[in-house]
Amino acid sequence: MLPGLQELLAKTPKNDRQGWVVNPEPIDYLITTQPEWCKPVTEDLAAFAEDYNNSAIARACGVTEASIRNWFKEAGIRRSTSKRRSGEIGVRRMNQVRKRADSSQSYVARRSVERLTKEHVSRIIARIGEAAGIIVQQPDEESGKRLKYASAHDLRRGCAQRLINAGVSAETLKLVMRHKDFSTTERFYGATRAAQSAATEINEKLSEARTKNELVGGLMGGTEEAPQLNAEELLKLKALLNSL
């Protein structure tokens, strides 16, 4: 358990320490009142799967790519590996899709006694990230990358980054992040450590070079303030600089 969570839970009286730590009450909501959100019927999903990639479908439906993957899984839709378009889905086509979705009531959410799913919570966090204007990925037409705002996954990645910066080992990070495969942890951990080592090396080399230039400037009568050294120390310093 991370220290911050431990401190937060410690504030709960011992007699109340039972049940779920986080358990928001289920709510009544009707997605049809939000025009930007749409879950196509199975036939339209299958047609989208043939023509567009997950990113394009997610943008048109106003949901995350994770939701699109879940919809395909629920509908039993399997996709081939052929390349698909990443552009925008036409307004006329989407209007027809929305009408069929409205008629079938395929995306009416009803009250449930179950806890909110991680997908639902993830959508809420994604909306918060967008409303706050926190951009984690700039759009790139060549690579097909779209504008991406902070999401729940970015919070998770940020937590991992802070642990690595604190010196936590890869084995411990795997347990905290609950990675099923150590290779997942190793890829992220290794890349982060390599970047940190490169940054440290560059700073050290530049600092050494700057110090050397300052000393040389002082010995040569430059504008830099010369160190106050005696004759013997100056000879040793010259010998050291010549050996570099």
Image: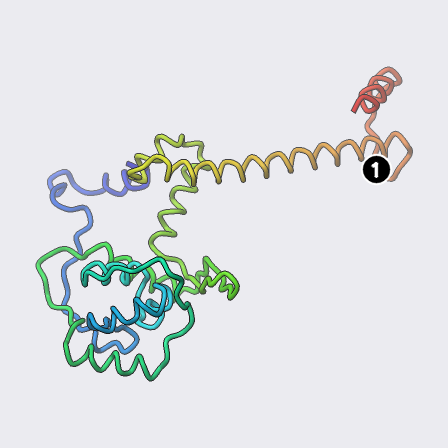
Seen at 47% across and 63% down, the residue is 144
Mark 1 burial class by Cα count in 10 Å: few <14, some 14-19, many 20+: some
| Residue under the point 27% across and 38% down | 6
Q: Quadrant of residue 118?
A: bottom left
72 and 193: which one is in front? 72
Using residue 31 as the reference point, say whether residue 65 is left or right of it.
Answer: right
Q: Is residue 25 above or below residue 205?
A: below
Q: Position of residue 130 (x, y in %)?
A: 39, 65
Residue 25, percent across and down? 14, 59
Q: Residue at x 14, y 41 (%)?
A: 17
Q: Nearer the viewer, residue 216 or 178?
A: 178
Q: Secondary structure at mark 1?
A: loop
Q: In this rendering, would 77 be left or right of 81?
A: left
The image quarter containing residue 89 is bottom left
Residue at the top extreme of this rendering: 232
Q: Position of residue 34 (x, y in %)?
A: 25, 76
What is the residue that sits farthest to the right in this orientation?
221
The answer to whether 184 appears left or right of 44 in the picture is right
Q: What residue is rendered at 20% in x and 80% in y? A: 100
Is the residue 234 above or below the residue 220 in the image? above
Residue indicated by mark 1: 224
Is residue 117 at all visible to an observer of this figure? yes
When asked about the image quadrant of residue 63, the answer is bottom left
Give the amino acid type for the residue marked by disc 1 in the picture: Glu
- Residue 13 vertical position relative to residue 126 in the rendered view, above or below: above
Classify 122 as above or below 186: below
In the rendered image, residue 193, in percent from the top left (x then y), is placed at: 50, 36
